[in-house]
Image: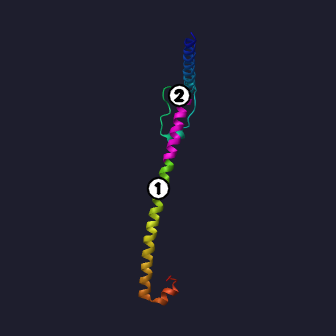
Amino acid sequence: MKRLLQRLAIGISAILLVAMFGCAALMNLATPCYIDEDVIGYAEEEPKSFLPFTTLWDAQRVDNKFDYMHLITQIHLQRQLEDDDIYYDFLKEKQRKYMASAKEFQKAVFGQDYARIMGAKE
């Protein structure tokens, strides 16, 4: 009899837990919630799932996608910045070599005195 009461108490507790979490999910599904059009556009997510109006459940789903898209955008921009730094350094070094070569040519054609007057670095 004691074991039967324990199993019954555990069973009832499990049913109450399921009912409690189920009701919480249904509350989010039934609570209307406005979602800004700009947020929907940024998140690239369909705002309505089941009902003809947006709910708190939809807003939470769109908000999660909104955070995800923000993270992806930030990573993409960080990679673009790193690529730009590498490309800039490459081109800057290349141009520095061209300018040094031109200054050497200038010294050879116009002489050392002209290069000194024009401010060419040795």
Region of the chain picked out in magenta, as a range: 53-72
Mark 2 neighbour density, 10 Å: few (under 14) some (14–19) many (20 or more): some
**Which residue is found at the position 56% from the left and 30% from the top?**
56
Q: Quadrant of the N terminus?
A: top right
In-front residue for pair 121/34: 121
Q: Position of residue 121 (x, y in %)?
A: 50, 82
Select label 1 or label 2 by which is in front: 1
**Which residue is found at the position 53% from the left and 28% from the top?**
53
Q: Position of residue 61 (x, y in %)?
A: 52, 34
Res. 91 image quadrant: bottom left
Q: Specify which label sits upstream in the sequence, 1 or 2.
A: 2
In-front residue for pair 41/96: 96
Residue 62 on the magenta span: yes
In-front residue for pair 114/60: 60
Find numbered disc 2 in the image and state the secondary structure of the residue it sits on.
Answer: loop
Q: Residue furthest top?
A: 1
Figure colour scheme? rainbow
Of the residues shown, which amino acid type is indicated by label 2?
Phe
**Which residue is found at the position 51% from the left and 49% from the top?**
74
Vertical order, 109 against 64 (above or below): below
Find numbered disc 1 in the image and state the secondary structure of the residue it sits on.
Answer: helix
Residue 76 on the magenta span: no
Of the residues shown, which amino acid type is indicated by label 1?
Gln
Mark seen at residue 10: none
Mark seen at residue 80: 1
Q: Position of residue 79 (x, y in %)?
A: 47, 54
Residue carrying label 2:
53
Type of secondary structure dominating the magenta stretch? helix
Mark 1 neighbour density, 10 Å: few (under 14) some (14–19) many (20 or more): few
